Amino acid sequence: MQKNSKLLLIILIPLLIVLNGCWDSRELNTLAIVSCLGIDKAEEPGKIQITAQIIKPGEIKAPQAGGGGGGKKPYWNITTTGETVFDTIREFTHESNRKLYLPHNEALIFSQDIAREGVEKYVDFFVRDPESRRLTKVLISKGKANEIIDSETELEKIPGINISQLVDKSVATSEASDVNLQEFFTRLMSKTTAPVASVIEVSDQGKEKIARLSGTAVFKTDKLVGYLNKAETRGLLWVIDKVKSGIIVVKSPSGEGKVSLEIIRASSKITTEIKDNNEPYITVHIDEEGNLGDQMSPEDDLTISPVWRSLERSQADVIHQEVMAALKKAQELNSDIFGFGDAVHRKYPELWGEMEKQWDQYFPNLEVEVIVNAKLRRTGLIKKPPEQE
Amino acid sequence: MLRSILKKIHFWQALNQTIKRQGDNSQELSPSNLSDNIQENLKHLQTILGTSSDIVVREFNFGYEGKIEAAIIYLTGMTSSAIVNDSIIKPLMYDTRLFSSNELLVTNNIELIQKTMLSVGGVKRVSTIELLIDGCLYGDTVLLVNGSQEALVISTVGWEARSVEEPKTEGVVRGPREGFTETLGTNTALLRRKIRNPNFTFETMQIGQKTKTGVRIAYLKELVNPRLVEEVKRRLKRINTDAILESGYIEQYIEDAPFSPFQTVGNCEKPDVVAAKLLEGRVAILVDGTPMVLTIPLFFIESFQSAEDYYSRPYYASMVRSLRYLAFLITILAPAAYVALTNFHQEMIPTPLLFTMAAAKEGTPFPAVTEALGMGLIFEILREAGVRLPRPVGSAITIVGALVIGESAVSAGLIGAPMVIVVGITAISSFVVPPQADAGAILRLLFTIFAGFLGAFGMMIVLLGILIHLSSLRSFGTPYLSPLAPLSLEGLKDTFIRVPLWAMFTRPRIFSGHDPQKQEFRLMPEPPSEDSENR
């Protein structure tokens, strides 16, 4: 018995290695590394048009002293149409000798048309396919998605990376929502919380077409229903606790100029309560700390206590206005982008069963109280404007 | 597995071999006593030793009126002619005539000669031809006196030997520079000079039917586990072979895991290192004719320890120690990891790095595995050539190697530049842990092949296999992975880091069970307290 099992092991272990073959082994020079995908409606009705941006590694190398480089674009934008997303992705193999390699895809751009029609069936492939990454940014283009992909970049060599980093760097202003596929998908799965995504458009600055972020796209279930502008976007981010930094411009206490306040820290908390009339009542607490960033007003010292307090107050007012603007827009569109429904669900699971079905009726008239506690901390390296020292 | 196959082969060979071996033995001399006739003895000797031209037989007469016939026999080159001339021939031939009236000197009483006439340290009386020949072949001088059934073997060993030099391997910046030599006596003395302790014991054996190589087992009687010494002796006695030319021969006959890529017997060229190991309760085996001394038992982690770790201060020593572990991991894993990443797990590479790697791969003809194996092969060839080549040609290898591997292969587009970097780092890392360099090269190959087939999954298979193998290995009854498995917290003080010497209280507990403590507690140096300053 033992002898036989040993013999078996001798036979089986090499088989384990050999029979696998070079399973899934792909050399780097057989990959078409995709940095960016754009999904549009094809001109032929019912069909999909996908634009892929494929990296050309040979061109990306820094030009060597003796030549090379040659000023060619280090990427190749290729467009194909097909019946379904997967079908279209495979369709690329007719034109590209290498198979599309999705794990390094930085951005997934849906055109406005697609988004209005309902984005769920297009997202399906990207969350189902093991090769696709959930950290891919999701963006909505105002025009056609392939125009965004064709846009120029100056600092980055690859537009796809440029787009992804634009979204990353939006932290500096907190005026665009940094949404990746995972977050988008999670919101899509929620019964009440609606997905959002950053909006990207091509702005013609002189001759060059440059991609720029502008606000946020608001969905209702999986359909695009409207847009938030920059201030409204920050209003949304205040509530969902995603503001990291940014500049708040307020009027100076004398009313003769402007003062910028830099957001240093911010946090928010949503609390819910069911009132006697069975209506949910939402309270949003926002704590914010800021620094005096610049002063373009005639006051000679903003740090005197009453002046400083009034700056803090106007800072809180701006935040309050931004949140209320976002709330108003969301209630107009009847799209719970803040996740108030999920907050109620967490607090009152036993009541939620009934409320969930009627959330669409509750939300537009939801009573929301916003309490802003804004503080100002430091003044930077100087206290008073320079000329008055 | 291999063991059982080999056992079967042994079974088939068993009969033939025993017959052959017995035949060999029957040719060996049966012990024969000396006769009291010197001519007969000389004749007998000559039939055994033959007419080899390095044998010197010097017949002479001595004593009152030169009446006693005598002869000395020695091998030229093995003996010191000064001792032979001044301490044997001169006292016998010249001094005995001065005291011509002394009647005692007419005697052929060999005991008297030994006691009164020879001014040499080591003199033995022997009565068989075999012992006599043994002595002669070892470099001693044999004195035969007519009328005596005994002969004297006089220690006159003196041959040209390499002096004590700094060893080529195991160089240190700080620490003793002396290394063992090819002479057993010198090596013994080097160790004895480090450990002046009556407990320090050498036991001598002769191994090798034909070579009669001197082998010495060294240990400290009070520290060593007696069963370990017994086991070492038992294994050494088992060796029944023609020749022992280097300690590596012994190592291969006594090691625990002959099929393992890992060595389970340590070797070392520096007396201070061997002394330190003896003081931990280990056993050393010194072999005549080689500077490499074996130490037993061996732990895996000993490969990562260097003498200098203990001579320099602990912070840097600990850092360097950790670096060695890292370098070992790099040397066995780097090419495999590169192959696995580029062929299977491209999604794990950061995007900008992937672009760079893909750019380098663009246009190269071979798969990554082939690149890795090929470059590894070329490196091994270059290394081997560098070791064997005569020194003046060495620079040629460096230039050709650097050009072929580094520059041309990349610019010709045969191999991607990152692969050259990976293989280069691997090569350099392999020299950081010299004791494991052999095992490292084999493991690297294994890892690379498996990574080529199965990616990180394949690497994991090999890694787990090696871990299982390592933890099952034993060196003379001691777990090879000790003190990591079985875990010993005391032992960890000298594993990945090296704590200050005053904080290491014990010898490795695993084989020095009865007296593990090696120093006082609280030896940490302190500035004098204020009380004592005031005093």
Image (cartoon, grey):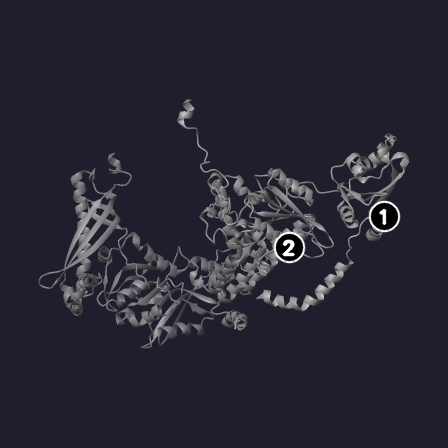
**Where does the image place residue B240, in percent across and percent down from the top left?**
69, 57
Q: Vertical placement of B79 versus B213: above or below?
A: above
Q: Chain of mark 1?
A: B
As drawn, the label of residue B222 is none
Q: Is residue B124 left or right of residue B253?
A: right
Which amino acid does the dot numbered 2 rest on? Glu
Q: Vertical placement of B179 versus A70: above or below?
A: above
Quadrant of the snapshot with the C terminus of chain A: top left
Distance from disc 1 to disc 2, alpha carbons, whole Å, reads 51 Å
Q: Which residue is mark 1?
A: B42
**Are both tags, 1 and 2, on one chain?**
yes
Which residue is nearer to you in this view: B247 or A191?
B247
- Mark 1 or mark 2: which is in front? 1
How many numbered marks does the figure carry? Answer: 2
**Where does the image place residue B66, in percent across and percent down from the top left?**
89, 36
Which amino acid does the dot numbered 1 rest on? Leu
Determine if residue B499 is in view. yes
**Where does the image place residue A102, in percent across and percent down from the top left?**
40, 66
Determine if residue A67 is in view. no
Residue B145 in which image quadrant:
top right
Which residue is nearer to you in this view: A307 or B496?
B496
Q: Vertical placement of A2 versus B96: above or below?
A: below
Q: Chain of mark 2?
A: B
Q: Residues within 10 Å of mark 2 (few under 14, many from 20)?
A: few
Which of marks 2 and 1 precedes in the sequence?
A: 1
Q: Which residue is mark 2?
A: B384
Q: Is residue A280 left or right of residue B296?
A: left
